[in-house]
Amino acid sequence: MAPAPDLRDTLLGAWRTNCRVTAFLVERIPPELWSEAVPGAPRRTVRGVAAHLHNARAQWLKTLGREHGITAPALVDRGRVSRADLLAALRRSGAGIESLIALGVGAGGVVPPSKGYVWRNLPLDVGHVLTYFVAHEAHHRGQIVMVARQLGHRLPREATDGLWQWTTRSREWAQADA
């Protein structure tokens, strides 16, 4: 039987591309849409949905990573964060999740359990952890696109089509990292 392949670079590359897709959308949210309320949820704004992506990453890092030496970045204020500050925060939380995935890969493919993880509804094998985080972000990216349409600020095709250009987003991440 052949040894299992080392999927570290593949898994980390997939996460980095997801991070770039999220940043790509945040970069393209029109300024007039940034503070608009989400229809049906007047206390939530587009800015708040975008900020939630970073804050959710940071909370997971606190829960799963703190005991293992992974520092969670500070939360952002969902009502006040600027686009530039959110993009910087997303880079920090993205790097933190990357560290969490690397921890799991290095521990035999499973993120080591932590006392802070009481929810226990997410299997901690790296495949499930990565899939959960990517699915969560994709859900909220879709929410932002839909809210823009509902509010009459349909995003340009370059932005919406660009969400699916993962090969391009992957190259952008590699260029920014070089």
Image (spheres, rainbow, N blue to C red):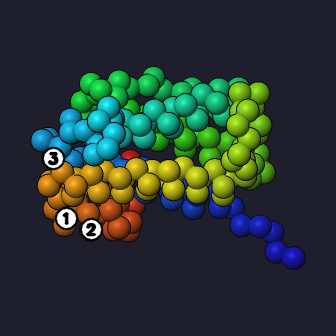
Q: What residue is shown with label 2?
A: 161
Q: In which quarter of the image is the N terminus?
A: bottom right
Q: Which of marks 3 and 1 is in front?
A: 3
Q: Where is residue 82 in the image (x, y as percent from the top left)?
A: 24, 30
Q: Is residue 66 visible?
A: yes
CB within 8 Å, label 3 to label 1: no
Q: Distance between the residues labelled 2 and 1?
A: 5 Å
The residue lying furthest to the bottom in this view is 1
Q: Answer with left or right where residue 42 lies relative to residue 153.
A: right
Residue at 45% across, 23% down: 74
N-terminal-most mark, 3 or 1: 3
Q: Is residue 105 visible?
A: no
Of residues 70 and 121, the one nearer the viewer is 121
**Rendered image: mark on residue 30:** 3
Q: How far apart are marks 3 and 2 (CA)?
A: 16 Å
**Which amino acid, by three-letter code, is at mark 2?**
Asp
